[in-house]
Amino acid sequence: MSLIVYLDKARIQPALDDIWHWVADIDFGNGILTTLCGEEHEVVFENYVRRPPLKTCWECDLAYRRAMRISVGRTHPALAAQCGTLRGTPPSPA
Ligand SMILES: [Zn+2]
């Protein structure tokens, strides 16, 4: 018998390279988590108290704000990065 842990994807804080993302989907069959910005990775569990200082994934933040109809300021970092990409310059690191 296995112990079941029920996860609420709105309350999970997935981190990749010390940047936290919003969850788009979790495939419980293969343990792959997909973020709003399109990252797909296998999940590894870690104790919350061991969490390092995390930076925000601005692409996820923008996608979350748009999905939840939260206002997005013109100076949002993800918008600035997209504008830079459109102009042919690489986005600056978050
Ligand atoms: Zn992200």
Image: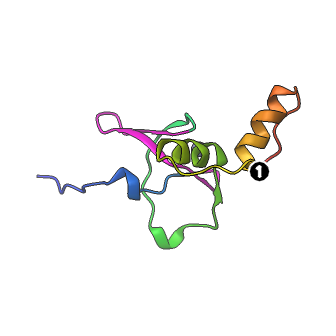
Residue 86 is situated, as x and y percent measured from the top left of the image, at 81, 26
Q: Quadrant of residue 10?
A: bottom left
| Ligand 1 occupies quarter | top right
* Depicted 2 relative to depicted 35: above or below: below
Residue 55 is situated, as x and y percent measured from the top left of the image, at 66, 59
Q: What residue do we see at 79% from left, 42% from top?
A: 80
Image side of residue 20 versus residue 68, left or right: right
- The answer to which of 22 and 52 lies nearer the viewer is 22
Q: What residue do we see at 18% from left, 57% from top?
A: 3
Task: Give the crowd class for mark 1: few <14, some 14-19, many >=20 residues within 10 Å.
Answer: few
Q: Amino acid at mark 1?
A: Thr
**Display colour scheme:** rainbow
Image side of residue 55 versus residue 89, left or right: left
* Depicted 14 relative to depicted 53: above or below: above
The extreme left residue here reads 1
Q: What residue do we see at 48% from left, 57% from top?
A: 13
